[in-house]
Image: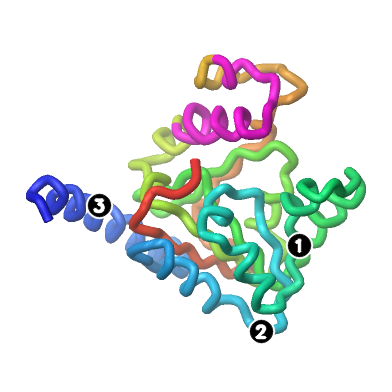
Amino acid sequence: MSDLLKAREWYNELKVEKTIEALKKNGFEALYASNKEEAVSRVLDFVAPEAVVGLGGSVTLRELGLPDKLRGRGHEVADHWEAVRRGATSDEVLEIRRQQINSDVFITSTNAVTENGELINIDGGGQRVAAMIFGPKRVVVVAGINKIVSDLQGGLDRVRNIASPMNARRLNRKTPCVVTGICSDCDSPDRICNATTIIHKKMGNTDIAIILVGEKLGY
């Protein structure tokens, strides 16, 4: 390994260690996975054999191949992305979103995690952020190292000007950020930034485990 790569790895490890320590201080269960394969293994450790699993709208989960791995283990999976792909009606998709909030385990990513141990998310429909706060018996959050930011302001900047424009582009939304790549706090009916949540500490009735991965994942 070159000195350049060693320095980068050292820096990333320090950042992850600081973030995990802060997450634990805020009441979360926090773990590190060095790569995608380890991340998948750690996620599956949280899913009991008979658990009903809800999946948040997340590019990270798809990059990890988690939907197929969960189905392969025989789980009932509430996955609205898959429902949309197979042409489900809007009412059917909405019902799946509601199932996610009542799942045994809800698995998702986060738009940003601060080095102070906070989770920041922006959502269009609200189901993902709602399920992260209350409903499922267990929430598992998987985030690549690219999601770590220094503080709340850095997190808000990240979700507005990195995650949201790319997600809007992926969804073929007609919003200014799809053209400029920068949030303009628009009034477009296609806007996907309708609710912003900051989870400062572990919620009283929701167990949240956060797995930080030593690779770049998602937006």
Q: Residues within 10 Å of mark 1 (few under 14, many from 20)?
A: many
Asked if residue 176 lies in the magenta stretch, the reply is: yes
- Element carrying mark 1: strand
Q: Is residue 102 above or below residue 155?
A: below
Which sits earlier in the primary sequence, circle 2 or circle 1?
Answer: 2
**Label 3, label 1: how many angstroms apart (C-alpha)?**
34 Å
Horizontally, is 141 left or right of 133 in the view?
Answer: left
Residue at 56% from the left image edge and 61% from the top image edge: 65
Q: Residues within 10 Å of mark 2 (few under 14, many from 20)?
A: few
Q: Which residue is mark 1?
A: 78
Q: Which residue is mark 2?
A: 49
Q: Position of residue 151 (x, y in %)?
A: 37, 41
Q: Residues within 10 Å of mark 3 (few under 14, many from 20)?
A: some
Of residues 212 and 76, the one drawn nearer to the viewer in this rendering: 76
* Quadrant of the rendered image containing residue 149: top left
Tag of residue 206: none
Q: Which of labels 3 and 2 is toward the front? A: 2
Q: Position of residue 207 (x, y in %)?
A: 58, 70
Of residues 52 and 112, the one drawn nearer to the viewer in this rendering: 52
Q: Which residue is mark 3?
A: 12
Which sits earlier in the primary sequence, circle 3 or circle 1?
Answer: 3
Horizontally, is 217 left or right of 192 in the view?
Answer: left
**Label 2, label 1: how many angstroms apart (C-alpha)?**
15 Å
Residue at 67% from the left image edge and 59% from the top image edge: 55
- Element carrying mark 3: helix
Three-letter amino acid code of the residue under disc 2: Pro
**Label 3, label 2: how many angstroms apart (C-alpha)?**
34 Å
Which sits earlier in the primary sequence, circle 3 or circle 2?
Answer: 3
Q: Which residues are magenta?
A: 158-179
Q: Is residue 17 above or below residue 43?
A: above
Q: Mark 3–mark 1 contact, CB under 8 Å?
A: no
